[in-house]
Image (tube, rainbow, N blue to C red):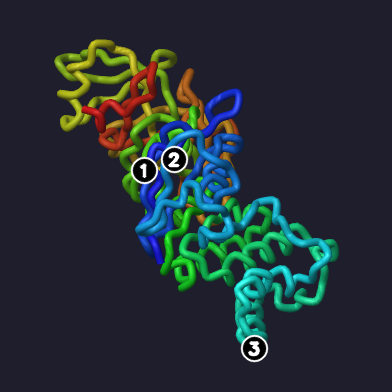
Amino acid sequence: MARLVVEGLCKGWDFPVIDDLSFTVEEGEFFVVVGPSGIGKTTLLRLIAGLETPDRGRIDAGAREITKVPPYRRRVAMTFESYALYSHLSVYENIASPLRARKVDRATRDRQVHDVAQLLRIDHLLSRKPGEISGGQKQRTALGRTLVADPDIFLLDEPISHLDAKIRHELRSQFHTLEDLRRVATVYVTHDYAEALSLGDRIGVMGNGGKLVQIGQPRDLFERPATLTVAEHLGQPTINVIAAELAEDEGNLIVRAREGNLRFKVADRHKQVLKDLKTRELTLGLRPQHVRPLENGGAATSIAANVDIFEPLGSMGIMIADTGGVRITALTHPEKHYGSGEQVTLAVEEDRLHYFDAETGRNLIEAG
């Protein structure tokens, strides 16, 4: 068993892909790196696995540096998004390949392969070749091969991205309790932010330029995003983003949209930081769960709006409403339905607003 330490890692070709990236994953920790496709997540895993050579930086597994150790001596197991299965071997033989390499006896090998195949619901496919199974079944085979490897570090590259929604949900639940994953350091990369929030003990949000924009526990990142980019990517539906400016109204500090009639009173706990700003322009973030249709009045801040789009999703509804120049997304009660063009009043929790620098996207409150 080993903790993983990545320090000052750099990798580039004609442009930087990973740039001065550092983080630590403790034994038993499930660390999720999340970011859009093409941002460098897979390159990061390949560097840790030894399949790419860093231009600069250091990788430690436990008490030893493995930056220049060949892949087969790193005790690292990786699941590839592209499966990387042996086409001439059966599903059983593909899963068993790490066990064969370690010369595990046949009885133990059979037991471990059948256990993981049953867990992944592919035990009925063990005799088939990769060309005879679906993409989702190939990905589960690749994941099974990783799970039986008994490494010091697990690297999982979008391991459930090709599965259907029901099996994805089941496997996400199992990732929380899989003993093999929970006794070693695991790095899991995904472009799915809901998946990251569900799985990660901690999350690292990867941004442009090959850096981790923010690292923290899921709740901290969701409630206190360091940048607008983090706020936009964590949470579904995505946060409402409004170009705004600070102003005074009868001695009160308010924030108002640069277009339309939206205006909100600044909460007392945010006033001092915003008063000290050198610019009056900023970007306002408002999560949909902090906006709701108001049925019987009584909210301190209410907004008149017209429904543009309403999506009933069973457990909740998603409403997109026009407030007179600014469209706002709100969550609604599952039993309420709204028609296009219907007039509604929206109540806003003003103390849950996020304030970001208009140019850099930096969270002004957290930074202040």
Q: Residue at x 34, y 26 (%)?
A: 362
Image x and y of residue 274, in percent: 22, 21
Image x and y of residue 148, in percent: 58, 72
Name the N-terminal-most of marks 1 and 3. Answer: 3
Image x and y of residue 105, in percent: 63, 85
Q: Residue furthest bottom?
A: 107
| Quadrant occupied by the C terminus | top left
- Vertical position of residue 187 compared to residue 181: above or below: above
- On screen, residue 317 versus residue 162, left or right, reads left
Is residue 189 or residue 148 the one in the foreground? 148
Q: From where the camera sits, is residue 36 visible?
A: yes
Residue matched to label 2: 205
Instruction: Name the element at disc 3.
Output: helix
Front: mark 2 or 3 = 3
Q: From where the camera sits, is residue 239 visible?
A: no
- The amino acid pointed to by label 2 is Val
Name the N-terminal-most of marks 2 and 1. Answer: 2
Disc on res. 107: 3
The answer to whether the residue labelled 2 contacts the one labelled 1, judged by CB atoms less than 8 Å apart, is yes
Q: Residue at x 84, y 62 (%)?
A: 131
